Image (spheres, coloured by chain):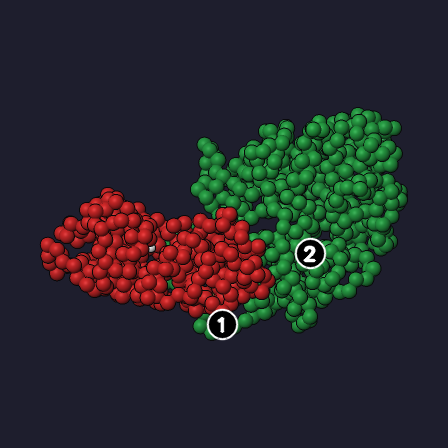
């Protein structure tokens, strides 16, 4: 625990991404050399890469601990909390220092002590907890309380953990990223073996166990139709498909089991029991990439419902049969990453596509659809088809290089533009932005944080030292229910308050639409947007995957050469 | 009747017709210490500790100031006024006022942990005590100075080894000298900003031993890279810092106890080093006075007063126009 607490302090104190990566490396390097420390390192990676544990000790027990061990009146504890803004930190500051402190290993906390605590009744739990805290060094307490409240956030992006692991082990970052898929699955326990597998020497083994492949992410295509031929060559070099607005997911069948992974790397099969039939119809050793949408009977593009319907399903805790019947989902498959256990990602898109067509045809599953291809002789023809997207519930077209392999993450644009995936949206004036400040609203909304400031990243995910650059404010586009939920998250993740404004840990991503964009010297971001509004809450997207300033600039109208 | 009461000009002693740390010009001002929110311009006469007098002259220019020793009694109209060490900065004093057997003490700012750069705090028995409450919340609990010193030295050493200067933002009067007295001068050169050095000179002239400090002018790049630099908070991000090829920065203040405060400043490190009493320090100082009436001012006054009231003291607050000097630029 001591080593993790020290790392936590270093990360917390670090003011740049580079410092954070360095601090992580400084922790990982000695740990790598000492297999006895791997069980601890496994948890450190889990927790920093975004793994979440349930709240292991209820807040009321922590408040009671504060009151009983300090003897302070309740109002003073409350006032202290208001001043600090974080319960774990308040406790760490209020409790009297320990007499003789012991250093209990992180893995002992995670594997034994904390789970055991959960099983106790209220009084026994309180007694055990206060015993633990009494013998805990002052410097360990903050991270301990952060762990037990399930709110361990230290501003480390998953990409930084990948980078630090790569630099510390000498392995390639994509290999680490791939091995890390599924590692932080909620509720999972990690062991020294897991850490060993993460840092093992490079071999050519395919994705292990039930883990998905890193998702290949698309770039926004913003260019006048007449430029497309020059930019992308003839449309015959591309596979065009409808871009549906659903949940991107990988469906895997391996070792007799099936798994459904979201892009945010959550296992989501529980929410979609109606896709079990799809899995059953697929041969073992298959990995499909596609989109989950609400769709009634039909094939191709028939009966596909807008995202709001899917949202309704996601909002439900329990999924009843009636609900399944009312809002059935389908998996629209558009790529085949694995067949008979073999990794197909290096094959050309067109080859993967034809294998996918065969697999979907053989499966004959009602809830499995093949993503239809859209064809046209030239770009204007394709643009005309794209204009009909809205009528069938799509957002536009996807363009995928015919000969291109399946990449990892978001490949940089540049010379390899024909190896990319492009999303060619109908309304391209939208980006996925991160909420960084919130302000109380007015009138009816005076008690809710309803006005938000949004930011995009200054550079791509792998760029060291990138920061969030604010560029727009928006206060409309959410339902009251969503707003209440966002408000609660804002209060939970507040970093500081300045009067009516709070800054928050960047976790919330929204698709932000606007009606125009122009260069602006007055804005830090260099651009000004017109009538920004929240199109939807991207619950599926981690903040690190939000769009960048370059994505935003790509939307600028082409200015005449000066 | 309280011997000392709040007036728009400041804390006033009617029996002796003088003000303590007035924030508006008055005829007779008794000054607890030289910080800008306590020693203001415009009064006709000033009475303060002898070590404070040069600080007041430096800050306020040509003023009529009389410096006295700790414990020396100044009497007028049957009111006896004396100054007693407050342990806050050089020359800082609590003001003891005695009239017809009743004793009141106005603490000014105080720190009960001795630090070697000024006379150590001495509790003064009194009936009424006007206490500061800058850090009047139980979340403020200072660690022993030796531990903070070790932390600062380790940070400086690591920076020096990595070839970057270590810039500590600290209030130029008091905090900067405390840091100087704590650090290990063997690690590298000690550089003082132009706002800090005149205060160092006053400390030295009053017999406080501080390690040698130099100006960065004409220093070699290699030496700059190993230096510990003391600069006022207002120097953060200023062109003055451009002379350092590479530097890490830190802020030394009691406010650094809370992570949100550290983050807000966007600095590399926060050292929890205060020249005010922490929560326990305030409580022990108050109880050592034996006072039955306590008025809190300056910071978390309402919180402290409520807490003391619940513990059976006759406690209230005094509205004052002091700043939060630990957080703001001089
Ligand atoms: Zn002061
Ligand atoms: Zn003050």
Callout 1: few (<14), some (14-19), or many (20+) C-alpha neighbours within 10 Å? Answer: some
Left or right of B111 in this view: B69: left
The numbered mark 2 sits on a residue in which chain?
A: A
Left or right of A19 in this view: B70: left
Tell me what hue chain B is rendered in. Answer: red
- Picture coordinates of residue B43 (x, y %)? 23, 46
In this rendered view, identify the residue nearer to me: A530 or A267.
Answer: A530
Q: Earlier in the sequence, mark 2 or mark 1?
A: 1
In this rendered view, identify the residue nearer to me: A147 or B164.
Answer: B164
Q: Determine the quadrant in which ligand 1 lies.
A: bottom left
Quarter of the image where one finds residue A482: top right
Q: Residue at x 78, y 32 (%)?
A: A302
**Circle on res. A350:** none
Q: Residue at x 46, y 44 (%)?
A: A498
* Residue with the mark numbered 2: A163
Q: Is residue A187 visible?
A: no
Mark 2, secondary structure of its residue: helix
- The image shows a total of numbered marks equal to 2
Mark 2 and mark 1 on one chain: yes
* Residue with the mark numbered 1: A101
Chain letter tied to green: A
Quarter of the image where one finds residue A229: top right
Cα gap from disc 2 to disc 1, whole angstroms: 34 Å
Looking at the image, residue A267 lies above or below residue A513: below
Q: Residue at x 47, y 62 (%)?
A: B190
- Picture coordinates of residue A389 (x, y %)? 75, 29
Looking at the image, residue B112 lies above or below residue A340: below
- Picture coordinates of residue B165 (x, y %)? 54, 59
């Amino acid at each position: 625990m001591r080593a993790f607490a020290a790392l936590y302090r270093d990360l917390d104190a670090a003011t740049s991404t580079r410092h954070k990566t360095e601090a992580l490396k400084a922790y990982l390097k000695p740990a790598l050399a000492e297999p006895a420390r791997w069980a601890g390192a496994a948890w450190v990676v889990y927790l920093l890469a975004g793994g979440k544990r349930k709240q292991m000790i209820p807040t009321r027990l922590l408040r009671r601990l504060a009151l009983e061990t300090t003897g302070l009146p309740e109002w003073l504890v409350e006032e202290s909390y208001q001043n600090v803004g974080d319960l774990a930190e308040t406790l760490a500051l209020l409790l009297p220092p320990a007499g003789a402190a012991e250093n209990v290993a992180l893995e002992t906390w995670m594997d034994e002590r904390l789970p055991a605590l959960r099983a106790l009744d209220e009084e026994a739990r309180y007694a055990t907890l206060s015993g633990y805290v009494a013998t805990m060094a002052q410097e360990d307490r903050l991270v301990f309380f952060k762990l037990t409240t399930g709110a361990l956030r230290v501003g480390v992006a998953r990409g930084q953990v990948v980078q630090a692991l790569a630099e510390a082990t000498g392995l390639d970052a994509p290999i680490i990223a791939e091995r890390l898929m599924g590692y932080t699955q909620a509720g999972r326990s990690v062991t020294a073996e897991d850490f060993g597998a993460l840092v093992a020497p490079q071999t050519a083994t395919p994705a292990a166990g039930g883990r998905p492949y890193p998702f290949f992410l698309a770039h926004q295509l913003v260019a006048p139709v007449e430029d497309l031929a020059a930019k992308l060559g003839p449309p015959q070099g591309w596979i065009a498909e409808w871009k549906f607005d659903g949940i991107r997911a990988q469906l895997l069948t391996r070792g007799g089991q099936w798994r459904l992974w979201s892009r945010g790397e959550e296992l989501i099969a529980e929410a979609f029991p109606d896709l079990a039939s799809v899995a059953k119809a697929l041969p073992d050793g298959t990995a499909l990439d596609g989109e989950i949408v609400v769709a009634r009977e039909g094939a191709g593009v028939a009966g596909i419902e807008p995202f709001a319907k899917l949202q309704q399903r996601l909002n439900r805790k329990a999924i009843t049969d009636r609900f399944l019947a009312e809002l059935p989902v389908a998996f629209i498959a558009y790529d085949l990453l694995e067949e008979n256990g073999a990794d197909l990602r290096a094959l050309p898109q067109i080859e993967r596509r034809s294998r996918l067509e065969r697999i979907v045809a053989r499966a004959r599953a009602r809830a499995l659809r093949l993503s239809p291809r859209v064809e046209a002789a030239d770009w204007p023809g394709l643009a005309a088809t794209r204009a009909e997207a809205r009528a069938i519930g799509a957002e536009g077209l996807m363009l995928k290089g015919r000969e291109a392999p399946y990449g990892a993450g978001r490949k940089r644009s540049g010379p390899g533009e024909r190896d990319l995936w492009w999303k060619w949206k109908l309304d391209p004036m939208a980006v996925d932005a991160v909420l960084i400040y919130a302000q109380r609203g007015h009138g009816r909304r005076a008690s809710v944080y309803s006005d938000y400031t949004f930011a995009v990243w200054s550079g791509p995910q792998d760029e060291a030292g990138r920061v969030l650059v604010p560029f727009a404010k928006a206060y409309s586009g959410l339902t009251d229910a969503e707003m209440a939920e966002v408000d609660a998250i804002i209060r939970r993740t507040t970093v500081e308050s300045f009067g009516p404004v709070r800054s928050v840990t960047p976790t919330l991503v929204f698709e932000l639409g606007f009606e125009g964009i122009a260069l602006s010297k007055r804005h830090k971001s260099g651009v000004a947007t017109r009538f920004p509004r929240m199109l939807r809450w991207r619950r599926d997207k981690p903040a690190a995957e939000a769009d960048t300033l370059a994505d935003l600039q790509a939307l600028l109208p082409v200015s005449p050469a000066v | 009747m309280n011997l000392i009461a709040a007036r728009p000009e400041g804390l006033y002693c009617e029996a002796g017709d003088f003000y303590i740390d007035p924030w508006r010009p008055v005829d007779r001002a008794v000054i607890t210490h030289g910080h800008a929110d306590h020693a203001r311009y415009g009064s006709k006469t000033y009475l303060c500790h002898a070590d404070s007098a040069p600080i007041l002259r430096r800050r306020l220019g040509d003023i009529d100031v009389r410096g006295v020793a700790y414990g020396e009694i100044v009497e007028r109209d049957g009111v006896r006024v004396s100054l007693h060490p407050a342990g806050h900065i050089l020359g800082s004093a609590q003001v003891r006022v005695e009239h017809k057997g009743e004793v009141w003490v106005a603490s000014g700012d105080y720190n009960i942990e001795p630090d070697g750069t000024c006379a150590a705090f001495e509790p003064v028995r009194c009936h009424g005590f006007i206490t500061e409450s800058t850090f009047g919340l139980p979340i403020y609990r200072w660690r022993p100075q030796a531990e903070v010193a070790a932390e600062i030295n380790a940070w400086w050493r690591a920076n020096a080894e990595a070839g970057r200067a270590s810039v500590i933002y600290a209030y130029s009067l008091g905090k900067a000298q405390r840091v100087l007295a704590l650090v290990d001068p063997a690690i590298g050169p000690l550089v003082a900003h132009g706002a800090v050095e005149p205060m160092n000179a006053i400390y030295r002239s009053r017999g406080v031993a501080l390690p040698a400090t130099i100006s960065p002018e004409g220093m070699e790049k290699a030496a700059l890279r190993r230096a510990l630099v003391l600069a006022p908070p207002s120097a953060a991000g200023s062109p003055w810092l451009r002379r350092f090829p590479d530097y890490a920065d830190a802020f030394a203040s009691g406010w650094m106890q809370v992570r949100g405060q550290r983050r807000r400043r966007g600095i590399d490190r926060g050292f929890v080093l205060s020249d005010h009493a922490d929560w326990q320090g305030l409580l022990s100082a108050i109880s050592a006075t034996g006072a039955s009436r306590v008025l809190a001012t300056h910071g978390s006054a309402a919180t402290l007063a409520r807490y003391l009231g619940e513990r059976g003291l006759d406690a209230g607050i005094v509205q004052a126009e002091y700043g939060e000097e630990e957080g703001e630029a001089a």
